[in-house]
Structures are given as structure tokens and as C-alpha cells.
Image (tube, rainbow, N blue to C red):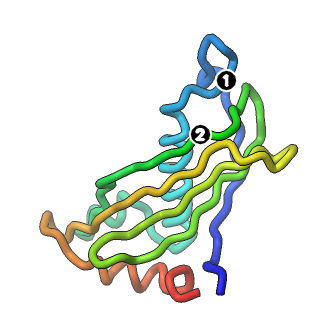
Amino acid sequence: MNKKVFEIEMKVRDYECDAQGIVNNANYLHYFETTRHEFMQSLGISFKESHVLGVDPVVTRADLHYKTSLTGSDLFLSSLTVERKGVKMIFHQAIHRKEDKALCCKGQIEAVILMNGSLSRGDYYDELMKEYLNN
């Protein structure tokens, strides 16, 4: 069964492009992070609110594969699915140019959950993400 996918539309801003006119590779990390933050908002909590509760997701690894470049003003779709592996939350993320559906970047972002500064299993997030984790 396919996992439920979260997806948002974004637009490349000109200042994100390098001298070659393509999106600088570091910006894809920002796009992926924005997607995860919007995902959490869609579940009813912000990262700031989570921090106030003492629950902090922390990225421990990012593995990105660049495929096709985005350029200034491109519209694109940024999506994610999420899975649990032990104490890790694994976010499978992808960016597709909206116009032609070309895969621009895909990545796997690993995170752990700290509860009041200590490593935890992250049950708090499991409950929030249950419809994404159980599909």
C-alpha cells in the first residue's frame, strides 16, 4: 500500500539562483526543510510550538540526489512521505518542476526526536503523523 503523501507548491526566487541561472544546490535543503515545516503545520503544530513543549526533531543525516535544475521563477511541487525506523524518522522527499513534472531533486532526511534534550522514541510525533505512518 502506498504511503500518504504531503505536497506543497513553491516558486523559485531569483536570488536562489547562481551565476549559471540555476538554483544553488544548498537551496534544495531549504525547500525540503520548508516542506517538513509546512507538513507539521498541516498536522496542527509548528516547530516553535513543539520546542516550547520540549519536543525537538533534529536532522541527523541528509542524502540528496540532484537530477534536473530548477531556474528562476519555476513553480515546483515539493512532497514527502515519512516512515519510522527505530528512533529515526525518515522523510523521503522529492521536488518536481510543475510544468513538465521533471524530477529535480530527491532526498532522504533522517531525524531523531529529543524530549527535553534527551533522545526519545518520539511517540508524540507518531501520534501526530499516524495517518502518514500507517498507510
* Residue that label 1 marks: 22
Quadrant in which the C terminus is drawn: bottom right
Label 1 residue SS: loop
Q: Residues within 10 Å of mark 2 (few under 14, many from 20)?
A: some
Q: Which badge, 1 or 2, is on the more N-terminal residue? A: 1
Residue at figure coordinates x 63%, y 59% from the top left: 79
* Amino acid type shown at disc 1: Ile
- Quarter that holds the N terminus: bottom right
Name the residue nearer the viewer: 93 or 129: 93
Q: Give residue 66's mark.
A: 2
Q: Amino acid at mark 2?
A: Tyr
* Residue 56 image offset from top left, x and y in percent: 28, 63
Residue 9 appears left or right of 135: right
Do the residues under discs 1 and 2 have CB atoms within 8 angstroms?
Answer: no
Does residue 29 appear left or right of residue 114 in this picture?
A: right
Instruction: Give coordinates of residue 46: x percent, y percent.
Output: 43, 62
Looking at the picture, does residue 48 appear above or below residue 11?
A: below
Which of the 4 image quarters holds residue 58?
A: bottom left
